[in-house]
Amino acid sequence: MDPTLRERIESLLQKNRVMLFMKGNKMFPQCGFSAHVLQLLQQAGVDFETHNILSDPEVRQGLKEYSNWPTYPQLYVDGKLVGGADIVSELQASGELSTLLGAKPASA
Amino acid sequence: MIEPTEVENRLRLAFPDSEIEISDLTGTKDHFQAVVVSSSFAGKSPVEQHQLVYGALAEEMKGPIHALALRTYTPQAWQTLQGKK
């Protein structure tokens, strides 16, 4: 991979502890799976940043190779890939997601 | 577009010992759900398990498959899950 692109990906991953690479943004998610993970993060009440891969074709392709993961959304915590929509949903269902995110338990 | 049976065959080659269930979620042969139960997942994190499946479908993921909802289990995890139902 192009070193400049790799550097850009790594700096994006460090932008926030919790980074969501998605289609669209917080205001306008442009894919059902991205919207779903976005919603789970918002419910968890943690601070997170998103990156819109639809407006960044270079990162869109580069991150697939970087993480050996062909689809979006992709959720990263502390620079490490947690998974896509399926894994994040399973983690949420089992209650592990908030632990992983370091979030306070959501009040009902 | 790709036939569900072709997706299944591709996965059977990669995971010979596995149980595989493919569903065409939209009827358009490009949005699939795959459940894969295989002992090759033992000792691997969910991310690593999904990476194995994506790896087996690398070519297909570049075009004919637009979305793949994925659930991977070791035979033990699968049995535990069935026990709960």
Image (spheres, coloured by chain):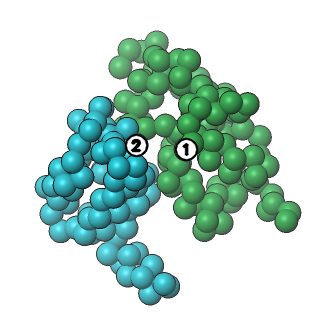
Chain colours: A green, B cyan
Q: Quadrant of the N terminus of chain B?
A: top left
At 47% from the left edge and 24% from the top edge, which residue is drawn?
A60
Residue A97, compared with residue B42, is above or below; it is above
From where the camera sits, is residue A84 visible?
yes
Residue tagged by mark 2?
Answer: B67
> Which residue is at the front of the view, A18 or A71?
A71
| Cβ atoms at labels 2 and 1 below 8 Å apart | yes
Residue B35, compared with residue A77, is above or below; it is below
Image coordinates of residue B4 in percent, x first then y, are 24, 52
What secondary structure is marked by label 2? strand
At 40% from the left edge and 43% from the top edge, which residue is drawn?
B67
Q: Amino acid at mark 1?
A: Phe
- Residue B51 — which label? none
Image coordinates of residue A65 in percent, x first then y, are 37, 30
| Disc 2: host chain | B
At 72% from the left edge and 38% from the top edge, which residue is drawn?
A48
Image coordinates of residue B20 in percent, x first then y, are 26, 65
Q: Quadrant of residue A67?
A: top left
Residue situated furthest front in the rendering: B27
> Which residue is at the front of the view, A81 or A90?
A90
| Apparent side of residue B23 relative to residue B9 in the rendered image (left or right) | right
Q: Estimate the spatial distance between the alpha carbons at disc 2 and disc 1, rounded to whole Å.
A: 10 Å
At 76% from the left edge and 52% from the top edge, which residue is drawn?
A43
Crowd rating for badge 1 (residues with CA inside 10 Å; few <14, some 14–19, many 20+):
some
Q: Amino acid at mark 2?
A: Ala
Residue tagged by mark 1?
Answer: A33
Q: How many marks?
A: 2
| Disc 1: host chain | A
Image coordinates of residue A19 in percent, x first then y, are 63, 36
Residue situated furthest right in the rendering: A107
